[in-house]
């Protein structure tokens, strides 16, 4: 599996870019999974639905499936955020795992940056950033030797990933199962 993180501040275009990456990599016949950071007590379950009722009754995991989808909701017992590595360990085998929003994760990342957000860049202080995807190349506040990718050209970013695939090879870590 290859794994790449997409980091940047809210409004920079991470989700749109990841969506484009999924489509472009899938079009090349590759299996793609996404690990997405969410804030606090998000919920994909709907109150009153069977799966929600089972979880509310105390089930550790609830798996719901149909002929087209499978969803697993696990209630974490620890009061801490799972790491990107713990979540990558949860994935079924795939060719590429795209990790969105874990800006401090110690895995290779592409920083998504737009000057219009008014937010600082991360690449000077983060040795895990391998490239910068931006629509504001001329406005980068600090010179860099990192590759600069056009945020509005997802095909070029996919070509970069595929061309540098060896740099994104992921070695799973021995981790305890989440939620115990």
Image (cartoon, rainbow, N blue to C red):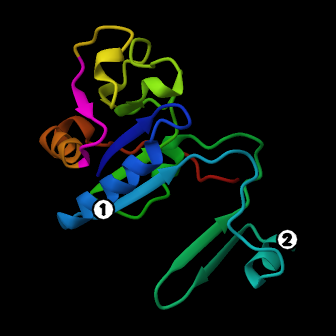
The residue under label 1 is 23
136 over 55 or under it: above or below: above
User: In front of the other: label 1 or label 2?
Assistant: 1
Residue 4 shown left or right of residue 51 in the figure: left
Disc assigned to residue 170:
none
What residue lies at 44% left-to-right and 29% top-to-bottom? Answer: 106
The residue under label 2 is 56
Specify whether residue 174 is in view: no
| Residue 8 drawn at (x, y percent) | 48, 31
Q: Nearer the viewer, residue 65 or 172?
A: 65
Q: How many marks?
A: 2
| Residue 64 drawn at (x, y percent) | 62, 81
What residue lies at 25% left-to-right and 42% top-to-bottom? Answer: 169
Dot 1: few (<14), some (14–19), or many (≥20) neighbours within 10 Å? Answer: some
> Where, by quadrant of the figure, is residue 30 drawn?
bottom left
Q: Nearer the viewer, residue 119 or 126?
A: 119
Mark 1 / mark 2, whichever is N-terminal: 1
Residue 23 shown left or right of residue 91 in the figure: left
Residue 61 shown left or right of residue 111 in the figure: right
Q: Please tell me whether mark 1 sits on a helix, a strand or a loop.
A: helix
Magenta part of the chain: 146-154
As measured in the structure, the alpha-carbon distance from the residue carrying label 1 to the one carrying label 2 is: 35 Å
| Residue 157 drawn at (x, y percent) | 23, 42
| Residue 143 drawn at (x, y percent) | 29, 8
What residue lies at 72% left-to-right and 62% top-to-bottom? Answer: 43
Q: Is residue 147 magenta?
A: yes
């Amino acid at each position: 599996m290859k794994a790449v993180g997409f980091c940047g501040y809210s409004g920079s275009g991470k989700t749109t870019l990841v969506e484009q990456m999924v489509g472009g990599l899938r079009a090349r016949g590759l299996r793609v999974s996404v690990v997405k950071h969410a804030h606090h007590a998000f919920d994909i379950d709907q109150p009153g639905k069977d799966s929600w009722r089972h979880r509310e009754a105390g089930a550790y995991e609830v798996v719901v499936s149909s002929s087209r989808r499978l969803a697993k909701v696990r209630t974490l017992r620890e009061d801490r955020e799972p790491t990107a590595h713990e979540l990558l360990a949860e994935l079924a085998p795939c060719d590429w795992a795209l990790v969105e929003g874990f800006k401090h994760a110690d895995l290779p990342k592409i920083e998504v940056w737009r000057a219009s957000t008014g937010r600082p860049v991360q690449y000077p202080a983060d040795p895990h950033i391998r490239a910068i995807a931006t629509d504001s190349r001329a406005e980068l506040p600090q010179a860099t030797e990192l590759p600069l990718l056009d945020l509005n050209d997802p095909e070029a970013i996919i070509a970069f990933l595929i061309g540098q695939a060896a740099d994104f090879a992921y070695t799973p870590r021995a981790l305890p199962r989440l939620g115990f």
